Amino acid sequence: MSGSGERAPLRVEGLSLLTSRDILLDRLSFAVEPGEVLALSGGAGAGKTLLLRALAGLAPKGVTVLGDIRIQGRRILVTQDGALDPLRPLGAQFTDLLAHQSGLDERTALRRAAEALERFQVPAAARRLALHPHELGEAMRWRAALALAMAAQPALLLADAPAAALDPTQRVRLLNDLAAWTREAGTALLLAGRPQPDPVHSGLADRRLILAQGRLEAPEEEPTPAPSPVEPAPSGPPILSVRDLRVAFPLGRSWRGEERWLTVVDGLSIALAEGETLALLGETGSGKSVLARAILRLVPPVGGQVSWLGTDLAAAPPEAMRRARRDLQILFPDPLAAFDPLMTIGAQLAETLESLRPTRSAADQAAWLAEALEEVGLPSAVLDLYPGSLRPAEAARAGLARALLPEPRLLVCDEPAAMLDGAERGDFLALLRAIRRRRRLALLYATQDAAEGLGVARRALVLLLGRIVEAADSAVLAAGARHPYSRALIAAARLARPALHGDPPSPLRPPTGCALRLRCPLAHDGCAQVPPSLDTVAPGHRVACHVAHDDAQDGAQVGGRAP
Amino acid sequence: MHEPAGTDSRTDPHWRDGPWQKAGQRLTAHRPAAAGLTVLAALMLAVAAGLVTGGGPVGAALAAGHQSLTFALLAGLGGAALGLLWGGAAVALGERAERAMMAPAIALTGLPLALVLPLAGGLLGPGRGLAPMAVVTALIAAPAVAVVARDELRALLRREFLSAAQAAGLTGGRRLRRHTLPNVILPLAAAAWTALPRALMAESLASLLGLGLPEGVTGWGTAIGAAARTGDAMALAGPALLLALTLWALHGVGDGMRLAFSTTGGRR
């Protein structure tokens, strides 16, 4: 908050936002220098969006703005939805803005628009200018919105959680490109977003402010997460074995009368020993979530086999299936939605208990429920609440309590912390890890955050379009993933720029050969011919990549470096 | 749900309320719905009082309202039941049956079905009874209810707590009884409500043309039609105003119910 004085594009002193009831933001003071990237972190509801709107002069009605906002030069706010005019082609939106802001004629404006899109590696940028926003994918729309904002050469760019809904590899690459551009152009960038991971660490941002309860806090030195104690590799026969599992959904018939299927999980095999932890890493459409549900038979597979303790679950009679459900429990990505809104938490926990452990007496049961809540750190008063009264963090813990009630042996987690932010997320994951160790649970942990998955589990599988592309111990993957997609996921988790370009292919029309080849920086002609097979490159390390195989045969070390 | 920054949902005095209370609060928080409910209640009382005291143009309008509202209620309930059955059966019978059953319903909602009632009135002739007219009105109101009911049921069946109940080992029957049915009541009530204004509208239009309620039964539409033919402005104003007010109230409550109860988010 020092600063070289007058030329800072944004200088805020004693900014407070008040309603008649509440103080929303309390005496904020900061400045952003030209070419500086300032990350504004804070959990949900911390007031990030409100602050950005106030800085853009768009404070909502009924909010009083006190204090001093000094802005030198042009400011542009990119809102959370990255709004573009839906009725007009991109080119027209660029020419309008540039003509209005800089007085450029149409040809110059269009040329600058194409250049701006090319900064974000949009292929055939000039042709895309004829398209309407709805003809672009989500990622492309974000590139266009940010390119539009930057083409106007603002002195200050306010970006409110840009591209938050995109997959990590796309989002992080976009943010890195944006930061590189603003630094080069001398634009001050205020980047609001989720608190983790620290964007300063990876060089994405120069400085970081944390907004909590309406006040700015100096970022604390983040405690490096304690390395999980090295556990001996669980041995023994697998308790869960998944063989060649296929899940597909019918899409109706094509005009030629052929059945069309959307294949989500394509011939996956997994084996899990007692107490073993396995992460499923992958982004949207990788099939990790459907795989997790197919194992519990919440989604019917079309082929393959899931056996629990040697029993094939597809052929299991109801009584055996119920015994298996006792052992196999799941955490859902939205814990609140996983509770029936019309029943109290207590009634739903009791229902689970009655269904899976029916032998207990009523008094026994009440004590059991209270104990389960205590284990996850919730007061027993939560039993009388309806799900609608719970906060997301409480719902996540209640969901964990429900899953632990029948004393399972395997816990399947489908992004269980997806709804949590910051400290709440860290606390929940620490709790999950502690309970897993104490109960010696086997864990299947599906997530798109590679750092989280590798931290929780001892082994990891990287999934792409329903197939395994890399399988190894977490430590091996973190230190030296071989597959370009694994490396991109791990880079994105650190907010480093992933080396994958373009957008993921549609699962309805996967590319021939390797599923990644259209985004892969290492792809060669051979990648289009045949899908790579999952081959062992080192003991316990399997990779499905033509390039990695060649490298392995040449003895070259590819390592974790991003090309 | 966007809450203003810095406020905690727990400062809300109603945060502990059960889901049914909260649904009620959401409904009455929608102003047209609250006003509509008040108007409907007042109208019911006025109609009941008008039947007792009677007399005068106001009494006549209220008496006509009794006929209109009774007919709309019966025919509307019939239409709602038919629509719910239609949508429910479509979802229950599996994907192929659903497509076959819902295609005609979707096609019918696009047609000006209200014109079918005067047509039926004309075809049935002056000696038509109340019952056939009520059946035709119910048939007119049903397709729209069926389409909404199907969407609501589909949205409900995708919800995560049903997967959670399955993971808890609940059998299909218990899941249906304990979780699906209770959760479907309010969204389906919102869907069913739309049949009431539709029935009232269709009946009034047909009666206005003299092709609706049979002779001897005077509804608002009949009264408006008669007053328009004789050019009696005073006699026209009462039923016309009451009809407009009732339709507005019914739609207001319907909107509020959709916004407050619908699983599909009321974005329709």
Image: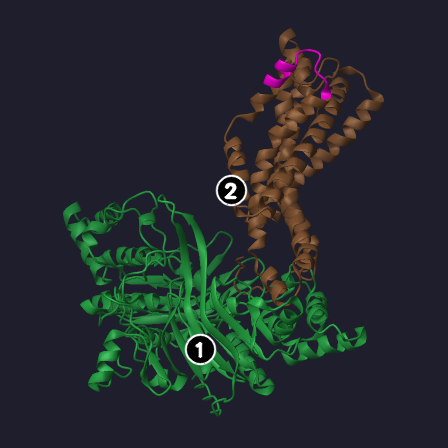
Chain colours: A green, B brown
Q: Judging from the image, what secondary structure is the residue with disc 1 in?
A: helix
Q: Position of residue B243 (x, y in %)?
A: 66, 25
- Label 1 crowding class (10 Å Cα cut-off): few <14, some 14-19, many 20+? many
Instruction: Name the outermost residue toward the right.
Output: B52
What residue is shown at x 26% (from left), y 81% (from top)?
A: A561
Q: Is residue A545 left or right of residue A163?
A: left
- Label 2 crowding class (10 Å Cα cut-off): few <14, some 14-19, many 20+? few
Labels 1, 2: front one: 2
Q: Judging from the image, what secondary structure is the residue with disc 2 in?
A: helix
Chain of the residue on which disc 2 is drawn = B
Residue stretch in magenta: B119-130
Of A268 and A165, nearer the camera is A268
Where does label 1 land, which residue? A453
Q: Amino acid under label 1?
A: Gly
Q: Position of residue A551 (x, y in %)?
A: 22, 81
What label sits on residue B99 in the rendered view?
2
Q: Position of residue B4 (x, y in %)?
A: 53, 60
- Quarter in which the C terminus of chain A is drawn: bottom left
Q: Is residue A250 above or below residue B87?
A: below
What residue is shown at x 29% (from left), y 59% (from top)?
A: A143
Q: CA distance from mark 1 to mark 2?
A: 41 Å
Q: Residue A169 colored magenta? A: no
